[in-house]
Image: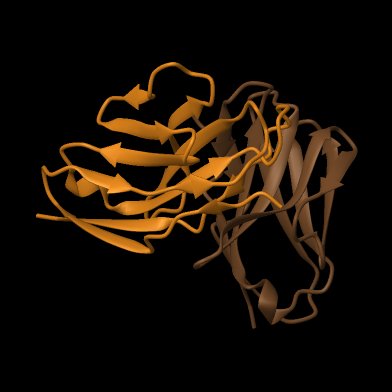
Chain colours: A brown, B orange
Amino acid sequence: DVKVTQSSRYLVKRTGEKVFLECVQDMDHENMFWYRQDPGLGLRLIYFSYDVKMKEKGDIPEGYSVSREKKERFSLILESASTNQTSMYLCASSSRTIDRYFGPGTRLTVT
Amino acid sequence: AQKITQTQPGMFVQEKEAVTLDCTYDTSDPSYGLFWYKQPSSGEMIFLIYQGSYDQQNATEGRYSLNFQKARKSANLVISASQLGDSAMYFCAKPPYSGNTGKLIFGQGTTLQVKP
């Protein structure tokens, strides 16, 4: 009954590394999202995609880019990881209804 | 920008008692929806309940209900008969504007601990 999967639950990277976070959904949803979760701030939207190769910036896109080459896959890229990008990253997908599904999250630590 | 506010960073409740988690929001949209999610320590976000702004009745899903007061722009989550498994973080969320792109803005979250 898996719906949204993320490539890693825990990830440790060094400052300056290029980091890829992968998200895959099996529900044929048009919309996919990347959120960042920090204590006291809730979830903040980084990027979202409403179709293949289509993307739109969220509230905190700086330092991130995304790729959506196939409908089921949405990748978040940290071009040059920094310590302030240490956080929990959550992927989500939705159709044109109220249904939204979240992945299990990736806890990224940048040292 | 629209904002969701959850003023209770942490809450305690005794097992089997009811608890209310607060959520207020600002919006000028005539039509909108409100969501509550539960996030256990495992990290996944679990959808709990949805309220449409034009729904005549307050939403109810099992032990979860919404105390929706549109004029006050509040949508408090009520959990009845708390269970130990209810210990988790709870988020209130809504779309930032009308039209269903699937985007959500979230409150800061409330951590609920249920005591045996």
Q: Is residue B34 left or right of residue B19?
A: right
Q: Nearer the viewer, residue A52 or B91?
A: B91
Quadrant in which the C terminus of chain B appears: bottom left
Q: Nearer the viewer, residue B4 or A101?
A: B4
| Residue with the most extreme top position | B56
Residue B51 drawn above or below residue B95? above
Quadrant of residue B28 within the rendered picture: top right
Whether residue A3 can be seen here: no
Residue A72 drawn above or below residue B15? above
Provide residue A98's location: percent of width, then percent of height.
58, 25
Quadrant of residue A109 within the rendered picture: bottom right
Provide residue B82's location: percent of width, then percent of height.
18, 43
| Residue with the most extreme front position | B71
Provide residue A33's location: percent of width, then percent of height.
70, 43
Q: Residue at x 39, y 24 (%)?
A: B59
Q: Nearer the viewer, residue A64 or A8?
A: A64
Q: Is residue B22 left or right of residue B28?
A: left
Q: Residue at x 26, y 39 (%)?
A: B79
Q: Tally the marks.
A: 0
Whether residue B105 can be seen here: yes
| Residue with the most extreme right position | A53
Q: Is residue B31 left or right of residue A77?
A: left
Provide residue B95's location: percent of width, then percent of height.
64, 38
Q: Residue at x 38, y 64 (%)?
A: B9
Q: Nearer the viewer, residue A25 or B112?
A: B112
Residue A8 drawn above or below residue B69? below
